Structure formats: C-alpha cells, structure tokens
Image (tube, rainbow, N blue to C red):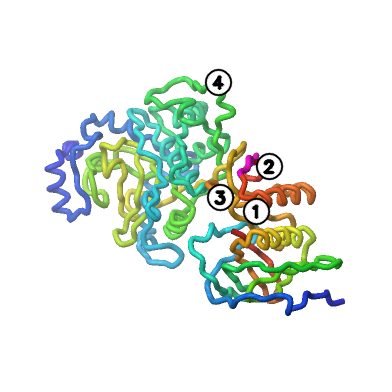
Amino acid sequence: MPEDRLQPAALNALLKEANARWQAGETSLTKLSPEEQVLRLGYAPGPGEETLEQRMTAATARLAAAMAVAAGYPASFDWRNVGGKNFITPIRDQGGCGSCVAFGSTATVEGTFRVQRGDPNLVVDLSEAHLFYCVAKAQGRTCGNGWWVAPALDGYKGGIVDEACFPYTAVDQACNLCSDWQGRLTKITGWHTVASPSDMKTWLSSKGPLATCFVVYNDFFSYSSGVYHHVTGGVAGGHCVCCIGYDDAQGCWICKNSWGTGWGEGGFFRIAYGDCGIDSTMWAVEGIEETGWQTNRRVIGLWSIDQDRNAWAYVDGIGWRKIASDSDNIFFDLLVQVASAKTSNRPVNFYQQQGVIRQVYIL
Amino acid sequence: MVDTKPQEQLLWGVAATVGSGAAQAGAPTAGPPISAQEGAAAVGASVWVTNQRVNALWTIAESRNSWVGIAGVGWRKLANNSDTAVVALTILAANAKQTQGILNYRQEADNMIHEMYLW
C-alpha cells in the first residue's frame, strides 16, 4: 500500500500530526524492498502460543499494569549503563534471513552470562548460525518461515557453540560446526516465561535481559529515535528482539534489535508499554551452566548457613560458586582448601560442573 | 543439659553501630562489600550484623559447641542444628580470625549465628 512506503519527511509529518513520540528517518531498512524487509523479521508463533493478534490484545489489556508504579524495582533500568557498566553485547545484523529468534535469544543469553559473571567485559559471542542452521533447521525452520523462542532456548539447554566455531551468514545452509564443537558449548540452566509487566521489570532490574517478540508494522522500518508506537502502515510480520531495560517516566521498554547499527538508536529502540504486543509475554534465561576449568582465580569471599553441606565461595570475576556436597568428606576437603586459598590470597585453578566447584588446585 | 559457654571477660573490642543486610536460604545473595559500614538490622526475629571482626574462637569437647568472639559484641554461638553446618561455620570463623576479614552474620532469636558472609 502507498502509505506503507512513505518517505521519512512525509512520515514525520504524519507523526507530528499524531503527536507521536518518535522520529522517522532513512535507515538501513528503508532502503530495502518490502520483500527484503520482511526477511529481516522471522517470528512465527509456535503451536499453543499466542498468535500475533493475541499478543497485541493481551499487551493492550496490561497497559495499565505496565504504567503502574510499584515497589520492588527502580523507575528505570538499562543494562547498557549499570553504574557506568555496559553488560550488553554489540549489535548484530541478521541480514536477509528470518532468523530474528536466534538473534533475540542469543542476545539474551549473552547478556545473562555477563550479568551472572558480574563482568561487563566478559568475552562472549555465541553462534546464531548454530542455533538457526542446526537446531532450527532440524525442526524444519528456514530463513523463509522463521521460528519461535521456546525451542530456541531449549536449543541453548542442549548447548550452542561460540561464533568463531560457526560464523553467521544470512542464507540457509548446512549445519557446519567446527571439529571441536563439543568442547565449545555454552548451556543455559533453564528458562521460563514472564507474563506480568511488574515481573518483567523486576527480572530486568535484578537478573538480566529478556527475550521478547512483537508485531512489526511498516512504519517501524523507518524508526530512527524516540519512543516508538504504531502510527501508520500495515502489519509486516512478527519479530523477536532482546529487552534490556525500561523507563517508567517515558512509559517504554528498551530493546536491542538485530538490524545493524544503521537502524534506530544505534541498533537499539524504545517502544511504548503495551504497544504491538511487546510485553504480552517475555522469556527469561535462568542462568548459564558453567562446566570446565577456571585458572588463576582468587577466592575473595566465603558463605555458609545452618544447612547441611551448604557453603559457597565467591571467585573474583566469576561470582558465587557452590562447594560440592556429595559427601561430608568431599564437602569439607574442598571447603578447607578453598578457605585456605582465601586466607593465603593465592591463585587457584578449579574445575566446576554446572557451577559447582568439584576440584581445586591452590598455586 | 546446658552446653558450656566461653567466658565473656576473655573477649574485648569496640562497639557496633547500625547498618543493614538481607537473608535468603539456600544460596548467598550479597556481593562483595562496596564500603565498610558497621551495623545491625532486624528482619523479623533475624538480625544482620555487618562489618564485624572476629577476635577470638572457643570450642570444647562437646557436640556442636563452637563459639566466635566478635569484637565489640561478645561471644556468639554457631548454629548447632547440623554437624556439617556447625563445622562449615567454624571453618569460616577460623578464616575470619586468621585474616581479620569483614564478617557479616545473621543472628536469630536463639542468639546463635546462622549464616555468615566472610570477605
């Protein structure tokens, strides 16, 4: 339709007329044909999930709840600036492939990993190609028919390699993992959906980013800044991104897109509470399952409680790790040695399995 | 039978002031201390006492009877509901004594220490 392809000047005139809170401009997406634009999406609700229409209806119904001020979380939060630290990995570009679910999910896992470690500089770049061209492909999903979040996060429970092991290119292709891929997997401990705006804000402000999906209208491709809300244009399709924060004063969620830095606010966007189904349901990654050796670390804290075999060590740059508690003997041997490492402030090499310390060298 | 206690006069130190803390069963929730602020804050029957130093230890040949001398506070018994818990808490207390690290602990209505963070 003609109004769907409005030039930025004409669209901005419409936005002004509508008292819109966002601005349109030439973006990396406005240069594409409608067919190419749709390929930058890729969210197809799965069996039993809300349809796009149901997401919009549910989000609209929860608008009052989203706008409400409640205790338990701050009035605004942004993982790009937590005490001056940025926990969000760089903006990616999914290109001409409907793989947004892989990008939104991966961005959420990467951000969660940095938050879990408490390390904004943690080098983590996971393979969207593995997630999409191996896991999704095995389920019959392609660049042309998209995917949904639950199986993508299930894929992360099985493990996804790092980007260098299977670099992303935007075309359907064979699952082509590196030879040592089995030793390069990052797994998550679990995931769950978050349904209420207050729970979303609580999670965002304390645990990490959330994956979310929404309805993209054609005016969204021209978004350059501000708080987006749908003004004009028809539905282009469903899209998934990573929600990294919110702002109650502006009444918006802050999200990371996968359309490169030439779109939006350097690749990010703000979108109004309740708009386009953005906050109907979001997906939380519960934690990163860490298995393997960590070397040259320092134990800087210890914790214990009045419970059987329950003690933890705080490892600098990693965070809290539980001491293995298979037996009294194992528990105390490890605890005494870890405590010794703290006392002497000596470096330690330790092996953790799913985040539990199971072997220690004090150097 | 009443457990033996350490003698109060064998401990000395400075007075504590007020601060805050938080409790959760099963896993630690607090990160490393950002600033040193002594204190104690009540959460129901629980009291978190923060930024303390251990200046004495005491134990005796009795089951689950281990005490910690807190500077300015006095003797506090370690929770005695579990063999492994009392030993783990004792290990942390001994470490605190040796390193003079910052100790944050949760004291319950029974006046025993039930949870410890040591930095």
Q: Is mark 2 on a helix, strand or loop?
A: strand
In front here: A324 or A157? A324
Q: Check disc 1 and give the amino acid type.
A: Thr
Residue A319 is tagged as 3
| Label 3 vs 4, first from the N-terminus | 4
Q: How far apart are marks 3 and 1 (CA)?
A: 18 Å
Q: Is mark 3 on a helix, strand or loop?
A: strand
Q: Majority secondary structure of the magenta segment?
A: strand
Looking at the image, which residue is at 58% across and 40% down? A296
Q: Which chain carries label 1?
A: A
Q: Are the residues flagged by discs 2 and 3 from a single subunit? A: yes
Q: Check disc 3 and give the amino acid type.
A: Gly
| Label 2 vs 3, first from the N-terminus | 3
Q: Which chain carries label 3?
A: A
In front here: A346 or A20? A346
- In front of the other: label 4 or label 1? 1
Q: Position of residue A140 (x, y in %)?
A: 48, 27
- Left-right relation of A348 to A277: right
Q: How far apart are marks 3 and 4 (CA)?
A: 31 Å
Magenta segment boundaries in residue numbering: A347-353
Give the residue pinned by disc 2.
Answer: A360
Quarter of the picture holding the C terminus of chain B: bottom right
Q: Are the residues flagged by discs 2 and 4 from a single subunit? A: yes
Q: Distance between the residues labelled 2 and 3?
A: 16 Å
| Label 2 vs 1, first from the N-terminus | 1
Q: Is mark 1 on a helix, strand or loop?
A: helix
